[in-house]
Image (tube, rainbow, N blue to C red):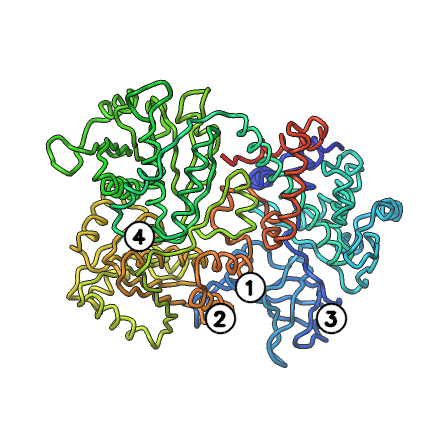
């Protein structure tokens, strides 16, 4: 058996099994080895059902009977129920929110169940026990124990031990768990393949000497410096740990490796960019001051710092790559407009006419149109041609027929003017990177909420190989520092951590069911004062009550009808959600922005790119279903003016963990603080956008460890400084090639 062999070469698989492995991205034997357990269950002492005691962690073996699915009487959530029986008695089992359990196991199936005994004397049950189908042979083999014979244990234990911070060295098989308390590796599953199958498959792979054929890409001096196990030892520990410390040490090693490889990739990209040429952009300080003098506000020190850093970057003649991060309302668009002003005030090299060009890309048509309108206002005193290109139409400012406004033009005409340089600023959606869009002198690309916009996309926009445009990427999404250091290692980071003067802190309250009508009265007060409100729901339509997996949460359609009928009958209510056509969304937002609608009931589609300064109150139903960063983004919809703003969060759950998380929303000073709390409280798996980032679960766990991220970053940048092409580190270069094939960052 070799690492590159296909799994199908060594395992007999059914078609559903093959499809499941494909969904998990597992093709080769090596893929199987790097499919790590998601957690480890500690099996309690083996026990007879007749001797169970409340509160004990136990492992019991018996037959499943009377499996069925029903809904709990109080919360109406789907529940699987059944009974496990052995020679000494029987016990009830319940699996909450897992209706599929009753369909997975046939009556009379022999299983091993691991769980905690719950209930009271005479009414004992196991809540959400972990089940494994077993045969008599498997029971005798005790598959939950180690997977190696004595010879392999000795070989593994001879490798470098993990040197802990206290300076002690321990082998991988020290501090064994007692025979009665085994660690159960639990693997991520997919329909058609179970965790137990992975347990057996990995045992077979490890027993066939595959570890001897896998080379460690991490230099040995790094492993020693940070007391990390070798690759072979780490693979043994991660799949068959004798103690939780072994598993943690292995995961720490793989986390370091993943962050280190990302940092290498980013560092190499950055080093290569330094060899690229770009457009030198230089504008006098007096011109910038004159442009900013017409802003309807005074720039904050944070904005001035960002502008100075950007202008300094663009002056150098090498491509700028900068990420501008700031809360909603902190003035990112004004910074981008100033950068655009400096660009269009610069002549192309060797010319006394024309200007350099700017492409401004937004994630949605609504946001693209809002930026188009904002730029028109910013450039009122310095009139230039500004174009808008989206999937539904094109516009140009200024209009020859509509003084002070924009006019609709054909796509063909707009593209012609962009190609010959007559329109210096072009704003749009992803329509901007279509082949038909050709710029003459594209010098600056501004990207809103699309951070992984890399060198290849910039070349696609520029269509020229000799010069690379400057890049300014912007986000209102709070990003934890560790994530910013890891994912955006090729970008300089600038924070806008100050709000414009006069903005009042938003008042955020957690609304309990008994306080709901007080909240409605406050909304009515705001509406009667001429303001507007958002009400956010987790769903678009009502769930089907007959479906076991249906998410029982408030929906936009039903909530809008209820509010109109029972609460706000004298106000205009409209709805907005992602299933609407772009034209319908625009129509709804236009009515809301013109105050023809008082209340907008919407999904989280309003999270990005909705700017209605007159809206001062937002009510978020089912708040526990959103991440803290997303709640903060939604809350930012109502801090667009100097009026007092309010945010009411309405959780459906009263659990202590839910309430603690929502209290963080009330007390946190800014989005950056919230992002860190979200990372620590909810875990890395809940961070939005993780699929786009292309980081594994173990890599995401590493983001909780700032020291690990900084160490990996320091080592990677130092290595790139000494060996930019990785010519002296061929195994690292090979690992990066494999990573590029598997992940798509840009």
Q: Which residue is mark 1?
A: 95
Q: Which residue is mark 4?
A: 298
Q: Residues within 10 Å of mark 1 (few under 14, many from 20)?
A: many
Query: Which circle, 1 or 3, is nearer the viewer?
Result: 1
Q: Residues within 10 Å of mark 3 (few under 14, many from 20)?
A: some
Q: Residue 84's quadrant in the figure?
A: bottom right
| Residue 192 x, y percent position in the rendering | 58, 45
**Left or right relative to 438: residue 679:** right
How far is disc 4 from disc 3 in space, using C-alphas?
74 Å
Q: Which mark is residue 655?
A: 2
Q: Position of residue 532 (x, y in %)?
A: 22, 61
Q: Secondary structure at mark 2?
A: loop
Residue 179: give x, y in percent of width and height.
Answer: 81, 62
Name which quarter of the figure residue 570 lies in. Answer: bottom left
Mark 3 highlights which residue? 48
Which dot, 2 or 4, sits closer to the camera? 4
Disc number lying in front (4 or 1): 4
| Residue 516 visible at all | yes
Q: Nearer the viewer, mark 3 or mark 2?
A: 2
The answer to whether residue 54 is left or right of residue 387 is right
Q: Secondary structure at mark 4?
A: loop
């Amino acid at each position: 058996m070799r690492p590159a062999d296909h799994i199908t070469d060594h395992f007999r698989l059914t078609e559903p099994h093959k499809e499941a492995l494909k969904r998990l991205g597992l093709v080769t034997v090596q893929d199987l080895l790097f499919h790590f357990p998601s957690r480890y269950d500690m099996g309690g002492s083996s026990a007879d059902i007749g001797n169970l005691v409340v509160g004990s962690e136990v492992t019991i073996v018996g037959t499943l009977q009377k499996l069925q699915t029903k809904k709990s009487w109080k919360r109406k959530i789907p529940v699987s129920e059944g009974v496990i029986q052995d020679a000494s008695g029987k016990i009830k089992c319940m699996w909450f929110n897992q209706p599929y359990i009753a369909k997975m196991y046939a009556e009379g199936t022999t299983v091993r169940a691991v769980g905690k005994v719950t209930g009271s004397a005479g009414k004992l049950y196991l809540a959400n026990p972990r089940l494994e189908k077993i045969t008599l042979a498997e029971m005798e083999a005790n598959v939950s124990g180690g997977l190696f014979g004595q010879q392999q244990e000795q070989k593994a234990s001879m490798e470098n031990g993990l040197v802990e911070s206290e300076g002690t060295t321990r082998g991988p098989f020290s501090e064994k768990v007692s025979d009665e308390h085994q660690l159960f590796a639990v693997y991520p599953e997919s329909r058609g393949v179970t965790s137990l199958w992975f347990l057996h498959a990995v045992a077979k792979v490890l027993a066939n000497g595959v570890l001897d054929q896998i080379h460690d890409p991490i230099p040995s001096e790094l492993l020693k410096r940070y007391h990390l196990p070798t690759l072979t030892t780490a693979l043994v520990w991660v799949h068959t740990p004798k103690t939780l410390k072994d598993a943690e040490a292995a995961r720490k090693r793989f986390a370091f490796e993943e962050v280190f490889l990302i940092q290498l990739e980013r560092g190499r990209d950055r080093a290569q960019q330094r060899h690229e040429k770009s457009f030198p952009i230089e504008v006098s300080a007096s011109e910038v001051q004159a442009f900013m003098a017409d802003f309807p506000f005074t720039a904050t020190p944070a904005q001035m710092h960002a502008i100075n850093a950007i202008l300094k970057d663009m002056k150098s003649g090498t491509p700028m790559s900068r990420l501008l991060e700031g809360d909603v309302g902190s003035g990112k668009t004004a910074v981008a407009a100033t950068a655009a002003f400096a660009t269009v005030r610069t002549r192309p090299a060797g010319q006394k006419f024309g200007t350099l060009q700017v492409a401004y890309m937004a994630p949605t048509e609504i946001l693209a149109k809002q930026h188009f309108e904002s730029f028109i206002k910013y450039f009122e005193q310095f009139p230039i041609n500004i174009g808008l290109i989206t999937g539904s139409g094109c516009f140009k400012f200024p209009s020859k027929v509509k003084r002070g406004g924009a006019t609709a033009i054909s796509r063909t005409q707009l593209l012609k003017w962009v190609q010959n340089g007559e329109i210096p600023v072009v704003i749009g959606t992803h329509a901007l990177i279509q082949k038909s869009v050709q710029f003459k002198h594209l010098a600056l690309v501004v990207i809103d909420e699309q951070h992984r916009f890399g060198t290849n996309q910039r070349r696609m926009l520029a269509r020229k190989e000799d010069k690379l445009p400057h890049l300014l990427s912007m986000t209102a999404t709070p990003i934890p520092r560790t994530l910013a250091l890891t994912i955006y290692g090729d970008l300089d980071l600038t924070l806008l951590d100050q709000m414009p003067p006069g903005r009042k802190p938003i008042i955020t309250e957690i609304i309990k069911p008994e306080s709901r009508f007080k909240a409605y009265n406050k909304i009515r007060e705001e509406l009667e004062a001429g303001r507007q409100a958002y009400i956010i729901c987790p769903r678009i339509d009502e769930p089907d009550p007959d479906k076991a997996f249906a998410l029982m949460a408030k929906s936009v359609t039903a909530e809008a009808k209820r509010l109109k009928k029972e609460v706000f009958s004298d106000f205009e209510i409209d709805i907005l959600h992602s299933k609407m056509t772009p034209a319908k969304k625009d129509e709804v937002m236009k009515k809301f922005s013109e105050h023809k609608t008082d209340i907008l009931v919407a999904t989280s589609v309003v999270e990005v790119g909705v700017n209605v300064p007159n809206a001062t109150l937002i009510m978020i139903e089912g708040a526990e279903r959103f991440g803290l960063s997303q709640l903060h983004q939604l809350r930012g919809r109502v801090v667009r003016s100097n009026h007092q703003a309010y945010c009411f969060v309405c959780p459906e759950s009263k659990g202590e963990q839910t309430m603690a998380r929502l209290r963080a929303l009330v007390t946190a000073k800014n989005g950056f603080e919230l992002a860190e709390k979200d990372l620590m409280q909810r875990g890395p798996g809940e961070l939005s956008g993780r699929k786009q980032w292309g980081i594994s679960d173990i890599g995401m766990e590493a983001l909780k460890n700032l020291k690990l991220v900084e160490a990996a970053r320091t080592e990677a940048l130092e290595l790139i400084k000494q060996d930019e092409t990785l010519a002296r580190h061929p195994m690292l270069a090979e690992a990066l090639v494999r990573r590029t094939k598997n992940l798509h960052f840009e």
